Image (tube, coloured by chain):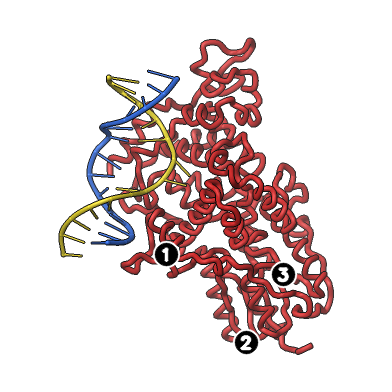
Chain colours: A red, B yellow, C blue
Amino acid sequence: MSQASVLMWFRRDLRASDNAALNAALRSGSGVHCVFVFDRRTLASLPPDDKRLAFIHAALAELQQTLRDAGGELLWRDGDPVHEIPALARELGCSGVYANRDYEPYARQRDAEVATQLAANLGQLQLYKDTVIFEQEQLLTGQGKPYTVYTPYMKRWRQSFHPALATEASTALRGALATPAALRPLPTLAELGFGEASLAGLRVQTGRSGALVLLDDFHRRIAHYKTLRDFPAVKGVSYLSAHLRFGTLSVREAVRAALAEPSEGAECWLNELIWREFYQQLLWHFPAVTRESFKPEYRELPFPNDAALFEAWCQGRTGYPLVDAAMRQLNHSGYMHNRLRMIAASFLVKDLLVDWRWGEAYFAQKLLDFDLAANNGGWQWAASTGCDAQPYFRIFNPVTQSEKFDAKGQFIRRYVPELAALDDKAIHAPWLAKALPAGFVLGRDYPAPIVDHAAQRAAALQLFART
DNA sequence: TTTTGAGTTGTTCGA
DNA sequence: GTCGAACAACTCAAA
């Protein structure tokens, strides 16, 4: 075997197949070392029971096994990648470092620092497009500017797409991986300072194998995606978000699934994948959205920011059953159905008059599938501060939404069991019910609504009008 | 340069 | 209960 080697640095692409950077590394003709860095700068901000680290850990365990089966190894480091990656590259005598591009501000800064460190020594940091179909300046308007409206972006995306862009990127691992000096097991979660039991409550299957199981399952349901996706009590969505986030599923596989068998559902799901890329490119071109409203006129909105109301929202104790069910689902499982994310977000901003960034931060802390671009885009959309603000159109009525999307209260009953005995009508708004079950006292067994929707709606309109 | 058509996901009100 | 119109005005993107 040749002495020359390169380093493949895994980040949010935790799979050994259909991986652009890995593919390029394998084709370089040098032995490929693989590494993952537990980034202390990121881990420091996570609670000890963080579900994402458990998800990552499970994915890494599978990845390590896959690489070992092919005669290689997944190396790991625990520290600051800006130090660890150049040090490891030097130690292994690598002539280059391969990784897939990450469009978040922190990642851009980190990669720029790593690139500088490497340049001073040996090799180069080579970044590849892997997490999206189109990146950076690939899709611009006729004026050469980034798109800020979804529909024209989506049309352009579809016009520019061709199947080669979603073709699998794969070269055989066997024989191309560098032979490891030794096999070193991954650190346990406990050794990393995290709780071992943090996967409890996590219902989504983990790792590359979990991604494939979910994808296979969704294949059979995708035709019904459009009609079922809005009902949280129904199995209508893909449940692939966390896998797309951590790269246990590639976006190309997702797009291929959307195009495999044309249907209204598949078409609709492709639009969601395009939304994902829309927000990715928005973050790339406008990184300031992480700190402030996209729309300048909404940067100084005087939100009252009542801490007690915010706390009630976090705990799922607002007295609005579907909002509370949604928040309890999030707190319990690290997941929230897409329809509920809109309802919960609209409620926090338009009913409780709390700054959308508080909600964004809370979701960022709790969501297993948390993605900065998508979360920020979703919150700014719900708050009407984003790139297609329509405040007059976008104040959800939490009761109407509940009656529409959880008509029989199945979802509410699952997550707010104290309301289980209420009938299908009363369960959406217990305070309006003519008669409640015997022994049930509103305000004791379940909170009375903490705000009046009609009044808060008017207040929100005023708040947004005063700009 | 000017014009034109359009803009994820809703709600409310009145007939 | 159902249905259509109003909700405001503006900016974006393309012709």
x, y (%) of residue A239?
Answer: 63, 47
SS under mark 1: helix
Please identify the quadrant where the C terminus of chain A is shown: top left
Q: Nearer the viewer, mark 2 or mark 1?
A: 1
In the rendered view, tell whether residue A289 sits above or below residue A90: above
Q: Residue at x 55, y 46 (%)?
A: A265
Mark positioned earlier in the residue sequence (2 or 1) = 2
Other-residue count near label 1 (Cα within 10 Å), few / some / many at <14 / 14–19 / ≥20: some
Q: Which residue is mark 3?
A: A77
In the rendered view, tell whether residue B15 sits above or below residue A306: above
x, y (%) of residue A454?
Answer: 38, 26
Q: Which residue is mark 1?
A: A285
Quick one: A155 or A398, which is closer to the camera?
A155
> Marks 2 and 1, how far apart in space?
31 Å
SS under mark 2: loop
Q: Which residue is mark 2?
A: A122
Quick one: A466 or A252, which is closer to the camera?
A252
